[in-house]
Amino acid sequence: MPRWPERGARPYDSGVQEPKRVAIVGAGPSGIFAAQALLAHPGIAIDLYDRLPTPFGLLRYGVAPDHTSVKGVGNALARVFESPAVRFLGHVEFGQDMSRKELLGAYDAVIYAAGAAEDTEMAVPGENLPGSESARSFVAWYSGHPDAAPFRFTGVRSVVTVGVGNVAVDVSRILCKTAADLSPTDMPDPVLDELRGHVVRDVWIVGRRGPQHASFTTPELREMLTLPHVQPVVHDDLDAIDLTTLDRRPKANVEALKIAAERLVPDASLRLHLLFWHRPIEVEGRHRVTGLTLERTALDADGRLIGTGEERTIECELVLRAIGYRGRALDGVPFDEKRGVIPNVLGRVTDTRGRVQPREYAAGWIKRGPTGVIGTNKSDAAETVAALVADLPEAPLVVLEPVEKLLHRKGLRPTSYEDWMRIDAAEGELGSRFGRSRTKIASWPELLNIARGRGSDGTATPRER
Ligand SMILES: Cc1cc2nc3c(=O)[nH]c(=O)nc-3n(C[C@H](O)[C@H](O)[C@H](O)COP(=O)(O)OP(=O)(O)OC[C@H]3O[C@@H](n4cnc5c(N)ncnc54)[C@H](O)[C@@H]3O)c2cc1C
């Protein structure tokens, strides 16, 4: 059981009788930033829950494995767990293992920081055919998420990614890179093996608006467009865009695309197509994907996007939709289905009619939607914590059930931060055998066996406590 000061033991220089207890649901960047902000206020004991046995959320399971400098943010976040006021309780799923009522019965306040675990659908016929997948599931697979289903590239020669944000750039770049490029990353071995064998020759990125409207950031776009052995093919007339009317980022993006359009890569083994002003209207195929039909788009006189009726079909064996992540409702917690977030005012959870729910807060992607960079979650969490701390003196007095009693009653054996460090060490050791700094372990049983100190070949089952 992770360490935690007993109620009444006055472990912090709090000046109050007993520490206030705060539970955070989700130990991704937002949850950890929220814990960090809470640490600035003495007398608060913090429990960070996650359904996974590992902390760090999308920093571990989303940020691209070849972007190692971003991964370094984890070192700064890890320091939060060094505080005796913070406990990590992994492998506890809100909704399944612990209800809203139980959590509110054991804590003075609860912060929901569960991220965005769903994705936006294209809502076109054929979307559910095998071979039509979300970029989210592809990312989860190459990042070694233990829930991810394996991807198979047998027979895949052409891939269409729908969406023009950084996730589309990430997944396309991973497909454009060679196994040699990717082998220094922490990708699990089976992922590397599968990518090593792929014979993809065409990767398409399709956007429904123009290049000047795309949301990818310029350094990421440039990186993708200048990959060795990759021939960029820009299918739009970039000269028709008036650069003088554009803000800095869209202008830089269009300029990067113009340079790429001029680039000739004689030894290219793969073509990277960029096609704007097209939207998907049907995923083709009988038993699995054989193509994606698109309709040309334009803006009407009022600036609204309209279909022109002009269609074309791109032959492909894999469609990846990368048109946005979405929050998933947490059992019993108010949820705005339209926006995919927990309704809130400055982080205070409200019901759908705007009434504040005492002692409940939200932070990060589940609070504001999937926007911004990791650092955006820091100010976002600080806003939530400011509201929580301001409310604490006014909070209704509740008799709390000791957390240990609750966990015991429910038969839960959370993994601790020390357990995560065992996983961390095991992944480092696995990587070092093949000259890599880390190789991710992607199976539930292995992760839990290592966390429980049993070695990866123990007998634990995924839900063993
Ligand atoms: C593909 C991709 C690449 C990205 N690359 C970058 C990048 O290069 N640079 C950058 O700055 N930002 C990047 N981001 C954005 C960054 O990852 C997010 O800003 C950040 O992770 C959001 O933090 P969060 O804590 O709100 O959500 P998450 O990181 O998703 O964390 C939520 C946590 O809650 C847990 N959880 C969910 N449901 C439950 C439950 N019911 N019970 C208990 N726990 C639960 C999850 O397991 C997870 O650990 C990227 C995002 C994606 C999707």
Image (spheres, rainbow, N blue to C red):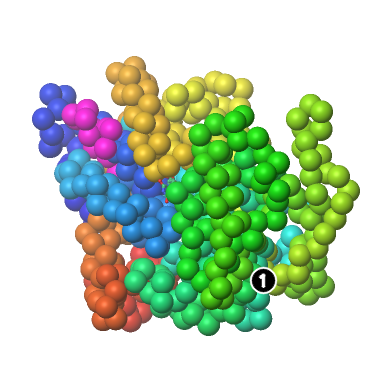
Q: Secondary structure at mark 1?
A: strand
Q: Amino acid at mark 1?
A: Ser
Q: Which residues are magenta?
A: 36-47
Which residue occupies the foreground of this view, 162 or 90? 162
Which residue occupies the foreground of this view, 28 or 238? 238
User: Residue 427, can we see it?
Assistant: no
Q: Is residue 301 left or right of residue 192?
A: right
Q: Position of residue 464 (x, y in %)?
A: 39, 68
Q: Is residue 241 left or right of residue 62?
A: right
Q: Position of residue 42 (x, y in %)?
A: 18, 29
**Up-down relation of residue 320 to residue 118 (above or below):** below
Q: Position of residue 389 (x, y in %)?
A: 31, 24
Which residue occupies the foreground of this view, 131 or 243? 243
Q: Where does label 1 land, which residue?
A: 158
Quadrant position of the C terminus in the picture = bottom left
Quadrant position of the N terminus in the picture = bottom left
User: Residue 311, can we see it?
Assistant: yes
Q: Is residue 222 left or right of residue 311?
A: left
Residue drawn at x 65%, y 56% as measured from the top left: 234
- Total marks in image: 1
Residue drawn at x 39%, y 43% as measured from the top left: 374
